[in-house]
Image: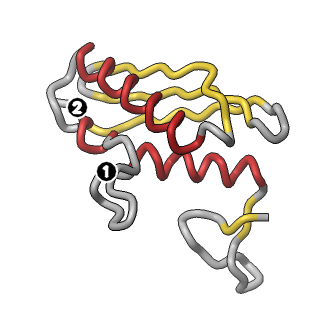
């Protein structure tokens, strides 16, 4: 078991825990939402997704996010997962990221969709 993220206390008053799949999902969110330079001892950690959300909308933003997210996930989580599909779309100033991945340890397939944020 792993400590759940963000940190919280469960109904028994203990530190909330999650399984391996939940832990990897938590790590994916940390990589995607951390801005490079935000972590003191790892200044190159993250992909800066939040910085790009408020930039101009369009296919250029989607392509930039696709490339930076792919690279960051491979670099920081390449030993835990294999990215099978990553789709970034910007429609009517809303950003959507869909990620399909396979866990290395268990060969399970998972997916996550992150919607929201005004782009442009």
Q: Quadrant of the N terminus?
A: bottom right
Q: Residue at x 76, y 36 (%)?
A: 104
For the residue labelled by badge 1, is the local secondary structure a helix, a strand or a loop? loop
Q: Residue at x 26, y 13 (%)?
A: 59
For the residue labelled by badge 2, is the local secondary structure a helix, a strand or a loop? loop
Q: Quadrant of residue 42?
A: bottom left
Q: Quadrant of residue 78?
A: top right
Q: Position of residue 21 (x, y in %)?
A: 74, 47
Q: Position of residue 103 (x, y in %)?
A: 74, 36
Of residues 47 and 95, the one nearer the viewer is 47
Q: For the residues carrying marks 1 and 2, which lies nearer the camera in this image?
A: 1
Q: Badge 2: few (under 14), some or many (20 or more) residues near its Cα, within 10 Å?
A: many
Q: CA distance from mark 1 to mark 2?
A: 17 Å
85 over 104 or under it: above or below: above
Numbered circles on residues, count: 2
Q: Position of residue 91 (x, y in %)?
A: 31, 19
Of residues 75 and 91, the one nearer the viewer is 75
């Amino acid at each position: 078991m792993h400590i759940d993220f963000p940190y919280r206390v469960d109904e028994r008053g203990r530190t909330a825990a999650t399984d391996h799949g939940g832990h990897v999902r938590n790590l994916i969110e940390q990589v995607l939402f951390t801005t490079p330079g935000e972590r003191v001892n790892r200044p190159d950690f993250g992909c800066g997704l939040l910085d790009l959300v408020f930039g101009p909308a369009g296919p250029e933003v989607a392509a930039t996010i696709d490339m930076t997210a792919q690279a960051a996930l491979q670099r920081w989580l390449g030993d835990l997962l294999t990215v099978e599909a990553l789709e970034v779309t910007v429609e009517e100033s809303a950003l959507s990221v869909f990620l399909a991945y396979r866990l290395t340890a268990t060969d399970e397939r998972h997916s996550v969709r992150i919607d929201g944020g005004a782009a442009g």
